Image (tube, helix red, strand yellow):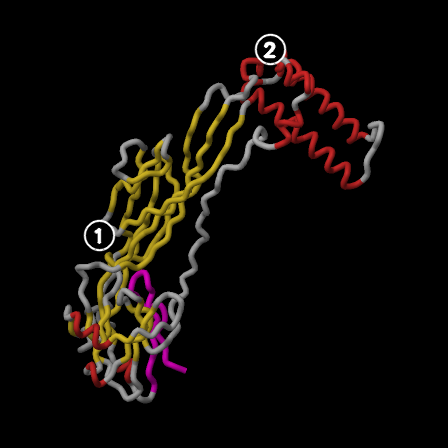
Amino acid sequence: MTRSTIAAIGLILCSGLAVNAQQTQRLTASKDGNYGLVYTLPTTAINITVEAERTVATPGEFYKYASRYFDAADAVPAQAESWEIVSVTLTSEGVTDPDADQYLVTLKSAASPFIIADRRGMPLAINTDRIAERPQPALPQPRDPQPTPLDGPDARRALTAEMVQSSSQAKKAELAAARIMEIRASRNDYLTGQADQMPDGEALKIILKNLDAQEEALTAMFLGTRQTSTRVITYTVTPGQELDRHIIGRLSNTAGPVDADDLRGAPICLSLQVTARGAMPVNDKGETKKMPRNGVPYCIPGTARATVSFGGRELAAQNFEMAQFGVTYSLDPELFTSKKSPSYLIFDPATGGIQTLAPID
């Protein structure tokens, strides 16, 4: 196994043949390139996707009279905005390290062995077009604020002419409370079949829906509204060592999720504990196996537990295989150049480890 940082070698050997939607390239061992292929093993990055919910509370027009007509414990007393983290999703991916070694491997065979690499030159597979399938959790999508009960036409329909004409807030509140009682009585008549004219089927559903919307709008005039929306942001960390409450971002009560250096917010922290380090393979005697000459490099990753916390509360935790806590070993190139039974290899794109190694059918 040799290492090279000569960019010209990579330019000679790479052909830009895309084999799937991930902008991959096929690198074919050929005589023109002395049967050499160049690639770089990945470093593992952790993506922390934070979903934060914004709540905007707005007092109702008749807030001063809420306690007179309602149990006003939930009434909004003043305009306010707040943010809270509602979910955290952890994933991993392979990224390039500008300081990482490039590996030059020689695969000389009449069968023209090839490597599938991504656009960054990291290996995905050898002697097969198949690449690793890494199921990823569904990530949350940002949600826009929805209209409040006071934003639609139902709020206007709920207002009586007397309410509109009155110049006294106290009188308007009294009329609004009386209208709520009328709506509840009408709904009860329809539900018990005591209305003077009972509609059938869909007509009844529409009437009840309109009554509910009008009551909701009038009630909001007393108790206020709370409008929610969400924002989603992903923080990416490529750790080179264990972390103890490393600040990856912050949550501001006015700006929501912000960068780590934005001191308007409280810190969102990532802790990382190595649970096992990758080790070189050993033989039956417990001795480290000898590295194959001119071998095909791959990573034997370590494992680490990532924990995200905010305000002293753990939000998410997950175990990951990570290249930077492992070791680099290599496979005998004869596995891929054998005339009788060549093999194929599928790399784990997040670590450069072996996902599948098997003979070609």
Give the residue number, with chain letter if any, for mark 2: 168
Kindly tell me whether residue 282 is visible in this rendering.
Answer: no
x and y percent of residue 274 in the render? 27, 51
Q: Secondary structure at mark 1?
A: loop
> Could you classify mark 2 by the number of other residues whose Cα lies within 10 Å: few (under 14), some (14-19), or many (20 or more)?
few
Indicate left or right for 280 with 91 as reference: left
Magenta span: 341-361
Type of amino acid at the residue the image marks with label 1: Gly
Residue at position x 46%, y 29% in the image: 56
Q: Is residue 109 magenta?
A: no
Q: Position of residue 114 (x, y in %)?
A: 30, 78
In the rendered structure, find residue 296 and report the number of the disc placed on it.
none
Residue 359 painted magenta: yes
Residue 162 location in percent, x, y?
68, 16
- Which quarter of the image is occupied by the N terminus? bottom left
- Give the amino acid at mark 2: Ser
Q: Mark 2 or 1 closer to N-term? A: 2
Of residue 356 and residue 79, the one placed in the foreground of this image is 79
Question: Outermost residue, front direction?
Answer: 165
Q: Secondary structure at mark 2?
A: loop
Residue 343 in percent (x, y) is at 33, 80
Rendered residue at 27%/39% (across/down)? 260
Q: Please state if 259 lies on the left or on the right of 71 as rendered.
A: left
Q: What is the quadrant of residue 63 in the picture? A: top right
In the rendered view, tell whether residue 287 sits above or below residue 231: below
Res 185 quadrant in image: top right
Q: Nearer the viewer, residue 132 or 56?
A: 56
Query: Which residue was labeled with disc 1?
Result: 240
Whether residue 289 appears in this view of the structure is yes
The Cα–Cα distance between marks 2 and 1, rounded to whole angstroms, is: 68 Å
Who's the residue at 32% across and 48% down the image?
306
